[in-house]
Image (cartoon, rainbow, N blue to C red):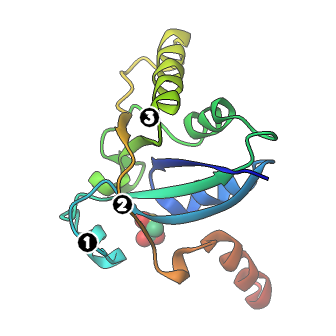
């Protein structure tokens, strides 16, 4: 099986990873930091909004089972792309909405899907999503990986 990569930022990466992991054809997903300047950033550093990184998810998928266009549909559906540098209560450039494309084909598909969404009239406000080439992706600390899955387990254990 030959897999491909897709990278998205759509607010706090816990929920973004969880959503993509549920998609059939997604083989793996990692949360991390990309699009910034600082090398090897930590969560605390990224939280200061000073490193330039976005909380992002690196998605590995099997293109024979799920297309990049379908992943784009998931991306648009799990957040509000009209919010600039925030998602709900999470405020800061690390929560920006961004498609980090890996090649020209992904770039064209991303732009086309944004135009389609704009034309659909779903949002009255403009879509703020940035489209930028993917750069160094720094995997986040282990406790941030599969965060919702782990939290679900704890909830089960402690009955909370
Ligand atoms: N408001 C969230 C942000 C976490 S996300 C990994 C929290 O601290 O619970 O940025």
Q: Nearer the viewer, residue 150 or 33?
A: 33
Ligand 1 location (quadrant): bottom left
At 52% from the left edge and 12% from the top edge, which residue is drawn? 121
User: Residue 95: x, y in percent?
Assistant: 37, 53
Mark sitting on residue 39: 1
| Residue found at the very far front of the displayed protein | 2
Label 2 or label 3, whichever comes before in sequence order = 3
The residue furthest bottom is 158
Figure quadrant of residue 145: bottom right
Q: SS for tag 2?
A: loop
Query: Residue 29: x, y in percent?
Result: 62, 61
Is 62 rendered above or below residue 66?
Answer: below
Q: Quadrant of residue 150?
A: bottom right
Whether residue 160 is visible: no
Mark in the foreground, 1 or 3:
1
Quick check: marks 2 and 1 in contact, CB under 8 Å?
yes
User: What residue does disc 3 label?
Assistant: 81
- Check disc 2 and report the residue beneath it: 136
Residue at the image point whose x is 47% and y is 80% from the top = 141
Q: Does the residue labelled 2 lie within 8 Å of ligand 1?
A: no
């Amino acid at each position: 099986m030959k897999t491909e990569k897709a990278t998205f930022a759509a607010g706090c990466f816990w929920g973004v990873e969880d959503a993509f992991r549920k998609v059939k054809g997604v083989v793996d997903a990692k949360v991390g930091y990309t699009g910034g300047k600082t090398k090897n950033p930590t969560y605390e550093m990224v939280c200061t909004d000073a490193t330039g990184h976005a909380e992002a998810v690196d998605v590995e998928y099997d293109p024979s089972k799920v297309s990049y266009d379908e992943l784009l549909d998931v991306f648009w559906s799990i957040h509000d792309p009209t919010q600039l540098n925030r998602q709900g209560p999470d405020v800061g450039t690390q929560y920006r909405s961004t498609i980090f494309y890996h090649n020209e084909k992904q770039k064209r598909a991303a732009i086309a899907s944004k135009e389609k969404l704009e034309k659909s009239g779903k949002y009255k406000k403009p879509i703020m999503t940035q489209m930028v080439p993917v750069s160094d992706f720094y995997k986040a600390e282990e406790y941030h990986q599969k965060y919702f899955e782990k939290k679900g387990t704890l909830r089960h254990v402690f009955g909370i």
